[in-house]
Amino acid sequence: MNSKLNAWRPATPADRTTKGRTVDTHVTDNQERSRFEVFHDGELAGFSEYERKEGEIAFIHTEIDPRFGGHGLGGKLARAALDAVRGEGLAVLPYCPFIRGWIGKHPEYADLVPAAQHERFGL
């Protein structure tokens, strides 16, 4: 396993201006802790834990710190994580209700879940 943190930025800029200042939001794949992490203005704001096996990734739990609620960070985290695993060619098993629900609302990501698993995950 690669112990290095891999920075991942979504295709669209996640930086935004808040009260006249720029706030940086970015997602990293912390492979040592088996989770994607979202940072907001330099602070860890949330994460999505996963388990990797050959050719697939199972998302098992996602959490956003309540202090960062209302910033859309869960969606940014889900999009960045799923874009990253798409780039790796991994199949997604969305055991995590948040990731599963996000995929349900963004059907362009449903192809990441093996077709034989769609019914199982309600997709």
Image (cartoon, helix red, strand yellow):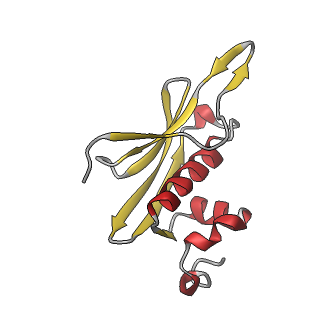
Percent x, y of residue 14 = 64, 34
Identity of the residue drawn at 32% across and 71% down: 54
Query: Quick check: 102 above or below 41?
Result: below
Residue at 60 percent of width and 66 percent of height: 100
Q: How many marks?
A: 0
The outermost residue toward the top is 20
Percent from the top left, x then y, of residue 72?
68, 41
37, 97: nearer the viewer: 37
Front-lying residue, 39 or 14: 14
Give coordinates of residue 77: x percent, y percent.
57, 46
Q: In which quarter of the image is the C terminus?
A: bottom right
Q: Nearer the viewer, residue 87 or 54?
A: 87
Q: Say which quarter of the image contains residue 28.
A: top left
Residue ID at (50%, 69%): 92
Horizontal side, residue 31 vs residue 22: left or right: left
| Residue 40 x/y as whole percent | 56, 29
The reply, left or right, for residue 103 in relation to residue 92 is right
The N terminus - image quarter: bottom left
Location of residue 25 (image quadrant): top right
Residue drawn at x 67%, y 40% as measured from the top left: 12
The image quarter in which residue 56 lies: bottom left
